């Protein structure tokens, strides 16, 4: 017999953990032990553990379960958390729970994932209005302003989410911050033409004082640049500059967004302001909390927020 009964218990626990639901998290100690060995990034609660991937999955599934209905046009985000929202849409279309849904992907990676799941796709050329967009974020401040673009898809993400009736942001608790900047560098998409010149201009903007501009190299889908590597190229053929704020937060997000938008050579920036309807935050104990507007949503609780001035 050997270890087979143990493997059977682990398999049963894993199967239970997959039961659909907004924020269902397995409590089996066998599953927790298996998860701890499987993942190097864990949330620890006493003797229990929950992986960051499990938290992302909880947020992604809840967003689809709560906001996507048959007949909708849905914007599909890009990144490690949005991946699970795409997965959930595919599951519900396959089961027949959702029908007549058409989706707009925000990157080639998302398009490939969605196509592999049989999700019907189009672009903004065919559908200029989106019922709901679901996407992750790299940082969320108390005003529900975001930094996005860690995955290199910020231009397409903003184009889709700007025309969405509802933009649902999905994150795990590690993405909450009291001010944008120090927790995650601000990505800025720029033209390849004279990119070093544009980098210098951006780095000297007074609205972004204290930032260090670093050209993203290697893989565009993360900001871990390779020293001496070739510039990372976006799906749109552009480059990305990551603005690092090591000490202080961006003092005025609205002014910073305006200054970047009006810099010649800048295609788009990763500040998403005044766009979020709800943010779903997955926590280490398996629960989710919702901040923003609509039924059941709370006022952001992780800092002294003030009224958001509008889209940027």
Image (cartoon, helix red, strand yellow):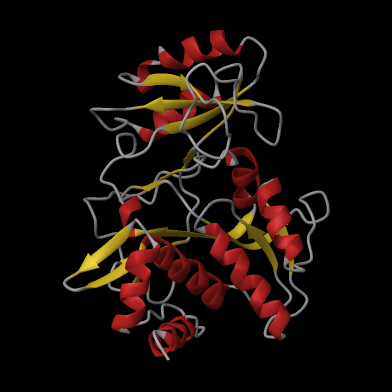
Q: Is residue 292 visible?
A: no
Towards the viewer: 169 or 127? 169
**Which residue is at 41% across, 58% downward?**
171
Number of dots carrying numbers:
0
Which residue ends up furthest to the left in the rendered image? 46
Name which quarter of the figure residue 254 lies in. Answer: top left
Residue 33 position (above or below residue 37):
below
Instruction: Give the percent coordinates (x, y) of residue 115.
Output: 76, 61
Towards the viewer: 205 or 26? 26
**Which residue is at 62% across, 38% downward?**
155
Which residue ends up furthest to the front in the rendered image? 1
Instruction: Give the percent coordinates (x, y) of residue 169.
Output: 47, 58
Which residue ends up furthest to the right in the rendered image? 126
- Determine whether, in the image, residue 95 is placed left or right of residue 259: right
The quarter of the image holding the N terminus is bottom left
Q: Is residue 257 visible?
A: yes
Name which quarter of the figure residue 283 lies in. Answer: bottom left
Towards the viewer: 78 or 300? 78
Residue 305 position (above or below residue 11):
above
Residue 69 position (above or below residue 144):
below
- Determine whether, in the image, residue 306 is placed left or right of residue 274: left
Towards the viewer: 250 or 135? 135
**Which residue is at 60% across, 16% downward?**
264
**Which residue is at 30% across, 51% downward?**
142
Residue 166 position (above or below residue 211):
below
Instruction: Give the percent coordinates (x, y) of residue 95.
Output: 69, 85
- Determine whether, in the image, residue 74 is placed left or right of residue 258: right
Name which quarter of the figure residue 88 lies in. Answer: bottom right
Instruction: Give the percent coordinates (x, y) of residue 72.
Output: 70, 71
């Amino acid at each position: 017999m050997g270890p087979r009964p143990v493997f059977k218990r682990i398999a049963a626990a894993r199967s239970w953990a997959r039961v659909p639901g907004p924020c269902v998290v397995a409590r089996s100690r066998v599953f927790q032990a298996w998860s701890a060995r499987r993942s190097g990034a864990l949330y620890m609660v006493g003797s229990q553990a929950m992986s960051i991937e499990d938290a992302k999955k909880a947020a992604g599934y809840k967003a689809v379960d709560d906001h996507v209905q048959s007949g909708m046009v849905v914007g599909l985000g890009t990144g490690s958390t949005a991946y699970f929202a795409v997965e959930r849409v595919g599951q519900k279309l396959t089961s027949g729970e959702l029908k007549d849904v058409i989706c707009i992907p925000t990157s080639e990676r998302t398009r490939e994932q969605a196509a592999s799941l049989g999700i019907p796709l189009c672009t903004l050329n065919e559908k200029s209005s989106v019922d709901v967009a679901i996407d992750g974020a790299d940082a969320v401040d108390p005003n529900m302003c975001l930094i996005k673009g860690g995955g290199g898809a910020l231009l397409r993400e903003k184009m889709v989410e700007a025309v969405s009736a509802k933009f649902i942001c999905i994150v795990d608790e590690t993405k909450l911050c009291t001010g944008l900047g120090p927790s995650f560098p601000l990505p800025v998409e720029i033209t390849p033409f004279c990119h070093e010149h544009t980098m210098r201009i951006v780095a000297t903007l007074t609205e972004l004082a204290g930032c260090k501009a670093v050209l993203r190299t290697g893989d565009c889908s993360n900001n871990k640049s390779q020293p001496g590597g070739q510039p990372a190229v976006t799906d749109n053929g552009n480059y990305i500059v990551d603005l690092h704020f090591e000490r202080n937060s961006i003092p005025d997000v609205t002014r910073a967004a305006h200054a970047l938008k009006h810099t010649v050579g800048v295609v788009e920036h990763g500040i998403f302001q005044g766009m979020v309807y709800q943010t779903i935050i997955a926590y280490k104990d398996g629960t989710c909390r919702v901040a923003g507007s609509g039924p059941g949503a709370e006022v952001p609780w992780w800092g002294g927020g003030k009224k958001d001035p509008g889209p940027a």
